[in-house]
Amino acid sequence: MIERKSILEAALLAAGRPLTIRDLQRLFAEDPAPPDAAALRADLEALAAECEGRGYELVEVASGWRYQVRKELGHWVLRLWEEKPPRLSRALLETLALIVYRQPITRAEIEQVRGVSVSSNIIRTLEELEWIRVVGHKEAPGRPALYASTRKFLDDFNLRSLSDLPSLAEFTEDAEVVQLPLPEVRGDAEGS
C-alpha cells in the first residue's frame, strides 16, 4: 500500500498551487477510513521536516501548503529564466505597504499619507498582480473604492496571515520603506 505522505507529496508537487487541508482530504474521500485534518497536518509537518537541508521546503501560506525553492537559493534558480523579473518602483511598494497596513483604504487616503498623487498605473499593476482588490466603497461623496490586500499577496510574500507582517514599530523613522520580502514576480508589471 502507498504511504499517505507519498500521496500528499505527489499532490503538492503536481498541483501548481497551494493546497488546503480540505483539498488534501478529498484525495482520500473514497478510503474506508479517511484521515482527519489533524492527521494530515501531522503528515505535512513531517514532510516539511524531511526537507531540512534540501534546496526546497514545504511551507504553509494563506492559501494552503506548497513546495517552494528555499529563499537563499532563489538567486541561482532565477538564472534558469532569461527574462528578469520586473523591478517594482518605490512608489508602487509604498502604495502597497499603505494598503496592506491600513486596509481598507481609499486612493485619496493613500495620497494624503504619501503627499503625492497615486498613478492609475500603480493601482492597475497591483490589481493585475492580484495583490490588492476593491473590497467596497466608502460612504463619502463619490463613494471612493476601498482597497485591501488579497490572499495571493499573502501567498506571494510567504505569509499565512496579515499578523505575520512585521509591526510598524519595528521600523525607524529614517527607514526608507517597509522591507517586505519581495517575491519573484512573473508577468508584465510595466507602468508601475
Image: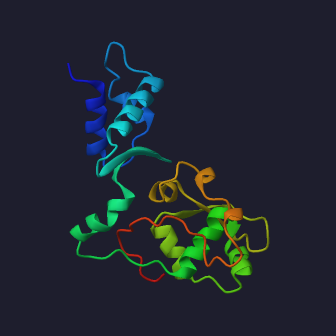
Please provide percent x and percent y for residue 143: 73, 69
Work out whether 39 lies above or below 188. Answer: above
Front-most of residues 187 and 76: 76
**Residue furthest out toward the bottom:** 116
Q: Which part of the image, by quadrant, shows the N terminus?
A: top left
Please provide percent x and percent y for residue 8: 31, 33
Front-most of residues 72 and 36: 72
Q: Residue at image x 31%, y 50%? A: 56
Please provide percent x and percent y for residue 16: 31, 50
**Residue furthest out toward the top:** 32
Q: Residue at image x 33%, y 12%? A: 32
Q: Residue at image x 53%, y 48%? A: 160
Work out whether 143 lies above or below 113. Answer: above
Q: Is residue 40 left or right of residue 164?
A: left
Q: Residue at image x 35%, y 47%? A: 57
Q: Quadrant of residue 14?
A: top left
Q: Quadrant of residue 186?
A: bottom left
Please provide percent x and percent y for residue 87: 42, 79
